[in-house]
Image (cartoon, rainbow, N blue to C red):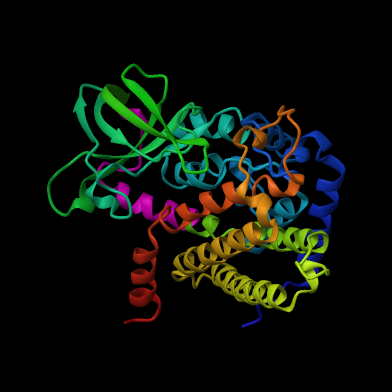
Amino acid sequence: MDLSQDAAEHAFRMEVRDFIAKNLPEELKANTAQGLRGPKEEGIAWHKILAKKGWAAPSWPKENGGCEWTPTQSYIFEEEMALAGCPPMSPFPIKMVGPVIIHFGTPEQKAKWIPPTLAGEMIWCQGYSEPGAGSDLATLQTRAVKDGDDYVVNGMKIWTSYGHQADWMFALVRTSSEGKPQEGISVLLIDMKTPGVSHRPIITIDGSHILNEIRFDNVRVPQFNRIGEENKGWTYAKFLLGNERALIAQIAQSTQLVAKLKEIAKQEADGFGGRLIDDPDFRAKLTAIEIELDALRTTNERVLYEARTGTAGNGGAILKSKGTFISQALSEVYTEVVQYYGNVWEQKALYPGWNQPPIGPDYAKNAVPLYMRQRANTIEGGSEEIQKNVISKQVLGL
């Protein structure tokens, strides 16, 4: 099994790196470089630059406007964007709902939703989790009942990222109570401006408003908006969750953070008159995480190889589980590196436009908020306990 990247893939990496260097405006990478939370418009602007190049949808088929790149090329593209500090783009349109519509939607549905999604003109959110259904999604209770040409939807979704900004939601709803719970689920695309849709913000421990509680009160959704067959949505959900879990691994982001921590450690003192980067205990701690990251990168290469050869297994669960551990470990080291500046948390300083005198260096501002945010990685996309069960049963055969 040859996991190495060949000459063509190296040349592709250089092409991507050159394009980003020439086309990423300074104003779009400034906030990312400082660890600030830029507005969603920055990600949309970068999406449109990529769309103009024809690179907005790396893995989509060419007939749908995509690049039809190999999994390895797509990974290289994602890694180079993260390392270059490109503004983050929502994964929902291109990596999640788009592939579901392409694979399971009708020609009419593709014609309606694929072009604006590809162009960055349609903002999506995901409606999966509910107050009583998270990692065990099959127990969801949001119900869709047929009424004429519509479904009438009632229920609630929770932990909905960017639901307050989205134009559309791709949602799992219950359309039948017969048989196994998984057999009565369908996928609906819901216009968030429809009467009866409301949202309540959920402010997370890091002080940000990304998550929301979404309520549906007699919301009418055309049956045209159902993707695929009725009651077959569990199959489509599993297809989509594999993409989500691979995203949460955050390999490129962790690689970038390792480099950042090394630069910070060159500037911080070790408490004994030297630099923190020269402290053997610090170096041992960071090196141990780098070794884990290298192992994760190799695992990702294996998953990419399996995708290339059509032998894909359950690598997504492994990537998600180990990637979560690494991202959390790095966030802990981040708080240690900035030392007592990590105890200062000016939430508003994380947003562009903050003009108060800084407390400590710029690189310290995001340390504690990142540490707080990364705690959620063990839950979202499937809790750590669930992922370990998947690995033990489907990978190890226990």
Q: Is residue 134 above or below residue 29?
A: below
| Residue nearer the viewer, 280 or 302 | 280
Using the rendered image of the protein, determine whether residue 110 is visible from the camera's viewpoint: no
Q: Is residue 265 left or right of residue 161?
A: right
Q: Is residue 345 above or below residue 81?
A: above
Residue in the image at 12% along x and 47% along y: 178
Extreme-top residue of the structure? 195
| Residue nearer the viewer, 191 or 387 | 387
Residue in the image at 76% along x and 36% along y: 28
Residue 297 location in percent, x, y?
A: 63, 71
Q: Is residue 256 left or right of residue 312?
A: right
Q: What span is colored magenta in the figure?
A: 223-244
- The part of the image, by quadrant, that contains residue 242 is bottom left
- The part of the image, by quadrant, that contains residue 250 is bottom right
Residue 124 location in percent, x, y?
A: 49, 34
Residue in the image at 54% along x and 64% along y: 323
Magenta portion: prevailing SS class? helix
Q: Is residue 214 left or right of residue 110?
A: left
Q: Is residue 135 left or right of residue 260?
A: left
Q: Is residue 6 above or below residue 15?
A: below
Residue 249 location in percent, x, y?
A: 55, 61
Q: Is residue 115 above or below residue 284?
A: above
Extreme-front residue of the structure? 272
| Residue nearer the viewer, 205 or 26 | 205
| Residue nearer the viewer, 170 or 360 | 360
Residue in the image at 71% along x and 58% along y: 256
Magenta-span inclusion, residue 225: yes
